[in-house]
Image: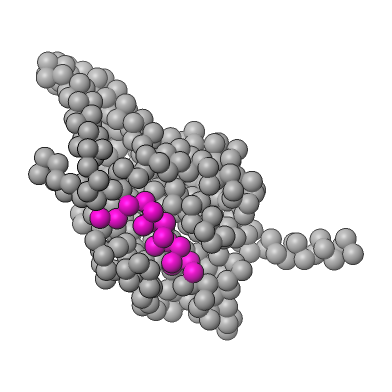
Amino acid sequence: MGKEMEVMIEGEFPLAATLTIPEGANEKYPLVVMVHGSGPTDRDSNAKGMPMNIFKQLSDLVVAEGFASIRYDKRGIGASKGDFYEMGVHDLINDAQAVVEFAKQHPNIDSENVILLGHSEGSIIAPFVNEMVSVDGMILLAGTAEPLADTMTWQREEIIKDVRSVKGFQGWIIRLLKVDQKITKMNEDLIQALLGTDAPVIKYKGKKINAKWNREHIHFDVSKPLQNVTCPVLAITGTKDVNVKVSDLEKIKRLVQGECETHIIQDMTHMLRKTDVEYSFSKIMNNNKKSLKQPIDSELKEIMIAWLRNWKNRQVKTEDTEMLVK
């Protein structure tokens, strides 16, 4: 699928990426830049034990539609330099910006036609990148319209609700052990530990925690840069996504200035796959890994293809209208 090129991008740390150019006679192609969700993920959106492979599959999709794509390894992951655990939100934005600027300079890229595609946390990063270097389209998959800290609070409430709803003997044990209170207490302790230091990385209960990233997210409210988005936007979330609120799609639509198309896909999870597991935080999280054996959802692909085709046609339409006006 297309011609894959290994490239190195000079950001604050060198970032390794794959630039894929469609097979064809064109000299310049519109481009889709892929911005990751959270966690130590590589250019294909794979992490140890979590082979999501989302960006590899989406790259094949956009290249088949005549778009170039660029996907990169996060700092300190794969062939990129730097340290993943020391990276904060500013760094994530700067890295994505460096990738966009690099790609715009490439002889095979039409620098006037660049789309940012964000999955999960990438949907928070993309609108901030657009403020640094404006883009011409945005695809937000499993995104949010509020600070990540608020989404994480909501996730915790969902976990507690889940824990409290367990019935029978297991439910009795959970109540006896006051598991719900322990979840809240553990979170409060972690927040104290994060705020009590300015170190980029801390050890918490034997685990390495990216403290700088956690602290910075408190100050990043994506609803602000969303208000400066004037390009066409496509936002898609699934009804079985327990990581973000489906209702945030409406907020995104209200906030952005440009035209915004939103889709809710029945039974699709945060992994962009469908599941018949009932909507429950723990059950869906436990099923996530198993769901990765499936390719990403075909309905999601169809919606994206239709939107990309419309997006490509928009210039033709604009030129036609201008001719009519004359």
Drawn side of residue 162 relative to residue 21, left or right = left
- Most common SS among magenta residues: helix
Please indicate, yes or no, whether residue 115 appears anywhere in the rendered image: no
Which coloring applies here? one colour
> In the displayed structure, would residue 113 be above or below residue 40?
below
> In the displayed structure, would residue 3 be above or below residue 83?
below
Pick out the residue farthest to the left: 206
**In this orientation, which residue lies closer to the viewer: 295 or 213?**
213
Drawn side of residue 90 relative to residue 232, left or right = left
- Is 99 in the magenta? yes
Where residue 54 appears, x then y in whole percent? 37, 57
Task: Give the residue at x 31% y 48%.
Answer: 213
Where residue 182 appears, x then y in whole percent? 17, 24
Quarter holding residue 77: bottom left
> In the displayed structure, would residue 223 be above or below residue 232?
above
Quadrant where the N terminus lies? bottom left
**In this orientation, which residue lies closer to the viewer: 150 or 310?**
150
Pick out the residue farthest to the right: 326
- Is 61 in the magenta? no
Quarter holding residue 2: bottom left
Quadrant where the C terminus lies? bottom right
Number of labels in the image equals 0
Task: Give the residue at x 45% y 62%.
Answer: 97
What is the magenta range?
Answer: 86-101
**In this orientation, which residue lies closer to the viewer: 104 or 155?**
104
Task: Give the residue at x 40% y 48%.
Answer: 120
Where residue 110 appears, x then y in whole percent? 58, 73
Where residue 281 appears, x then y in whole percent? 30, 33
Task: Give the residue at x 41% y 60%.
Answer: 94
Please indicate, yes or no, whether residue 87 appears anywhere in the rendered image: yes
